[in-house]
Amino acid sequence: MKNRYAIVLAAGRGTRMKSNLYKVLHPVVERPMVQHVVNQLQPLALEKVVTIVGFGAEAVQETLGDQSSFVVQEEQLGTGHAVQQAEDMLQHMEGTTLVVCGDTPLIEAETFQALVDHHEQTNAKATILTAQAPDPAGYGRVIRNEHNEVERIVEHKDASDAELLVSEINTGTYCFDNKALFHALQHVSNDNAQGEYYLPDVIQILKQQAETVGAYMTADFEETLGINDRVALAEAEVIMKRRINEKHMRNGVTIIDPSNTYIGMDVEIGQDVIVHPGSMIYGVTKIGENSVIGPHTEINNMNIGERVVMKQSVAMDSTIANDVHVGPYAYIRPKTNVLDHAKVGHFVEVKQSTIGEGSKIPHLSYVGDAKIGNHVNVGCGTITVNYDGREKHETIIEDGAFIGCNANLVAPITIGEDAFVAAGSTVTKDVPSEALAFGRARQANKEGYAKSLKKQDK
Ligand code: UD1
Ligand code: CA
């Protein structure tokens, strides 16, 4: 096997995106598109990956970190000029160089591998990854001679009417004999419609030098989609989302409406989970078997157990154990830990709290900075008063306690094991185990008072 290198082109401004964010940093399913490209190069175990950066150089470098080396292209004079920037790093190397655009995030490692293998097997100096485009507008066209051999690539803006009819496009991905590449680049001019040094011109130059130039056509045009504007960005999002959803469905997850279900790259979902429409599951998330998610549920960085039911809710950076009921309309904020068989019911917000086994917060509560033991009942409308305007304080509710409706638990406070808090109480002092706390005005009834008022009205 030859030494293999890759050059990732990521210096362009991306004018057509009309954005302050550099094109290759626009995310497709959570990750900047250039990150997808570099991730898909990883399995090829290349000697070196060099990313050409220009616009947003620092941000791109920060994104890719040590997955790549970097060279700055000070002026964006075209894709050929961009590759030339890697000259100092690569020109003397023997081997194969894969050139990939940072704006084609859907190409998978298997396709890169197939291209490299084909290139090396055919002993070519250059091999273009091509595809048949249903609508080739905007792409460079692959021009073949009467023997069906690749002659050159013509850019859309430079193409004749006849050439515009060609549907085989240059995907912007190529394999080169490394030395031949840098040699040929010296002959590329900018005499074209865009006044740029085009990388694809290398093909024609090598062909004229009677070198072997070929093409490897991928069956899947969709995979090679180049993102130049937000219309293509949205298309890429749909395609990648579909791939992810299909993977989960094949693994035994039921997705009721895949076109309306959004799942990130780092999500693991157990068998027989049902995901209802409008659900967005992102971040590093795990969902155990037989859980039911959604409809309209937003999940980010969650560890969710088995047989959990979660409806119309938002949850992030937290853990939910098995057999838990969440929602409808619950909000689980970071550092929450909900244990087995607990319930976080409708219009309940929980933040940085532990909800013990079998404990229930069925409706309309705020629980923040609390440690709730096992088998606690938190009545409707109960609030942990955790914030005094300066600091957050902790509420501890021990096992088996019963908090009546509409209680205010003014933290720091501890409600002891099996204690009772009367409905409507504002509790400011610790409640001992098994005690009843009563923190509200006593009711007084004035017999006949209403009746006498009615008489006055007459
Ligand atoms: C390019 C190809 C076209 C191909 C298409 C596939 C050229 C001249 N054309 O066109 O044949 O069909 O990709 O998607 O190569 N870049 C730099 N420095 C530059 C210019 C561009 O790093 O000076 C980078 C961009 O950031 C981008 C990539 O190169 O990631 C491609 O550039 P772009 O302007 O998008 O080329 P296309 O017009 O799409
Ligand atoms: Ca492009």
Image (spheres, rainbow, N blue to C red):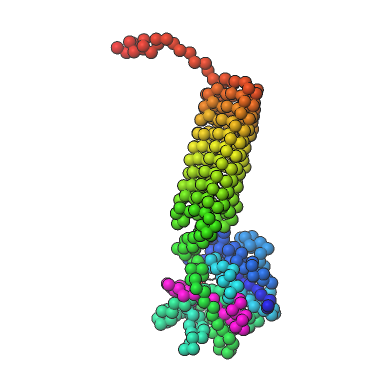
Q: Is residue 265 left or right of residue 169?
A: right
Residue 130 within the segment the image draws in magenta:
yes
**Residue 373 percent location from the top left of the image:** 63, 33
**Residue 376 percent location from the top left of the image:** 59, 31
Q: Up-down: is 370 above or below 98?
A: above
Q: Is residue 320 visible?
A: no
Q: Residue at x 61, y 28 (%)?
A: 400
Q: Residue at x 52, y 16 (%)?
A: 442
Closest to the observer, 269 or 176: 269
Q: Quadrant of residue 425?
A: top right
Q: Residue at x 33, y 10 (%)?
A: 455
Q: Up-down: is 429 above or below 302?
A: above
Closest to the observer, 16 or 409: 409
**Residue 437 percent location from the top left of the image:** 59, 21
Q: Quadrant of residue 161?
A: bottom left
Residue 26 within the segment the image draws in magenta:
no
Q: Which residues are magenta?
A: 116-140
Q: Up-down: is 188 above or below 303?
A: below
Q: Is residue 1 left or right of residue 156?
A: right
User: Which quadrant: the N terminus?
Assistant: bottom right
**Residue 278 percent location from the top left of the image:** 46, 50
